[in-house]
Amino acid sequence: MKSMTLRRAVCCALVSLAVIGGAQAQTPAAPAAPVAGLPDFTGIVQKNAPAVVHVEAKYTGKTARKGRQAQGRATPDDPQMDMFRRFFGMPMMPSPEEQQRTSLGSGFIISADGYILTNTHVVDDADTVTVRLQDRRTLTAKVVGSDPQYDIALLKVDAGGALPFVSIGDSRTLKPGQWVLAIGSPFGFDYTVTQGIVSAVGRNLGSQDQPYTSFIQTDVPINRGNSGGPLFDLQGRVVGVNSQIYSNTGGYLGVAFSIPIDVAMNVVKQIKEKGYVTRGQLGVMMQPITDDMAKAFKLGSSAGAAVTQVSPGSGAEKAGLKAGDVILAYNGQAISQVADLPPLVGMTPPGSKATLQILRDGKKQDVTVTVGEMKRDSKTGAVTQGSGEPAPTRSGTTALGLSVEDADSDTRKELGLKAGEGVVISDITGPVAARAGLQPGDVILMVNQQRVGSAAAFRDATKGLKAGDTVLLLVRHGDQSGFVGLTVPGKGDDE
């Protein structure tokens, strides 16, 4: 009985809809907007799959595998890589012994004479590397060179003839929302195709071992074995090298990262010409700009990078940069955060000129800098000295709650201070200052971008402050310097 009632209810609803539909039919409806169909990737796959290879790296124990530790590389089990994971490994749940002896990944042929691109972490320190082509040929590959910071390795095979190769695109033209697809060997399943869209560009992951790469973020499914494989645009051109994913499980969660192809091809060019990769260096240490700092700098927003230290003899020093400058743009490209600058500087050829737009004393100006060369380990290629990397920071929305004293000669010698440079914090008198990280023994070098060298000078620089005023301090803690914005509390504020 209930079933019959339900049927009748449905019939009545259908009749009502038919009547309503008939009434609406008397008034012509506006034509529906055409719906674009989903792209067909079959042509791209058929054309490019023959140029994608399966990469297998074996470790026999003949080569000491200390490269990853020396270069700051992280394995999938390293806590450092808990969320950002690079993928290599054997399919079908291999034994621990097999995992230690073999890693699998992907790669792609970039020229008919057998040059192949993959990730450094796929072949790093391997004793032998082989690649398998789509026609099932297996060839021994030579690691021509690699760069651990960019995570790009260049291989070479001799196939006895011309090989199919991919077309190289321009990753700088990518925009969020564009379709892209990957071809690779996830879990050892060769020539697997996955697709998605570009989620973001210029993504810096905050990684200590990859500060010079602005990644392409996609939602293309990437898994173990996809590392080193190509990312294509709809024109069938390679725009990225698939590298890692964001995951707390080890599996794909919808966020993947690829190295821009213009970065990868820059590595290829340098390896072919010099055998190693160089990076540009400004010679500055920087920190992010907080809201309080932006207020003190008289910036409309917290965009930019605040210079906290300038290395003696560097291009930045010779160009006149100094602590307290705010870098707003590099060669015309806006710097919205500190992490934006290292990739731009790193890609600049050493010895070339770069134009910085800076803010100094509330005024914008352009400064031309001769870019230096980053120091590197001659064996591993690892960077040994930072350039444009964010320094440890101490900042907060705090009030002035401290006392200072002059530094004696012994203290100055110990801290490397010149005569008339800086005052030492002797005591923290307010809880908010303590929450900002200021500590007795820290050295205040500047107040509102004016250098102070005595307790009297500090008092002069901070007198006349009223509730709501923000004071910008340049503070040295140990051998690092950073800006701290302190806001004077008003009545009723937490003091």
Image (cartoon, rainbow, N blue to C red):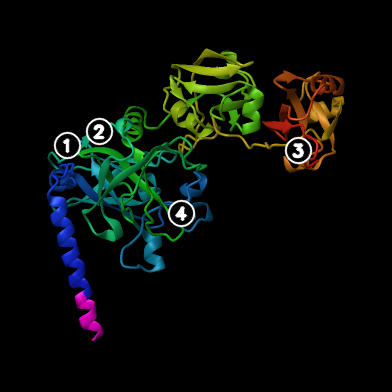
Mark 2 nearby-residue class (10 Å; few <14, some 14–19, many ≥20)? some
> Between disc 1 and disc 4, whose residue precedes?
4
Residue 103 % position (x, y): 35, 56
Q: CA distance from mark 4 to mark 2?
A: 30 Å
Residue 273 % position (x, y): 33, 27
Task: Residue under label 1, please give it.
Answer: 112
Q: What element does badge 1 sit on?
A: loop
Q: Is the Cβ of the residue at disc 2 closer than 8 Å to that at disc 1? A: no
Q: Is residue 32 magenta?
A: no
Q: CA distance from mark 4 to mark 3?
A: 36 Å
Q: CA distance from mark 1 to mark 4?
A: 33 Å
Q: What element does badge 3 sit on?
A: loop
Task: Residue under label 3, please give it.
Answer: 438
Query: What amino acid type is highlighted by mark number 1?
Result: Ala
Residue that protrudes farthest toward the bottom in the picture:
1
- Which mark lies nearer to you, 1 or 4? 4
Task: Residue under label 2, please give it.
Answer: 169
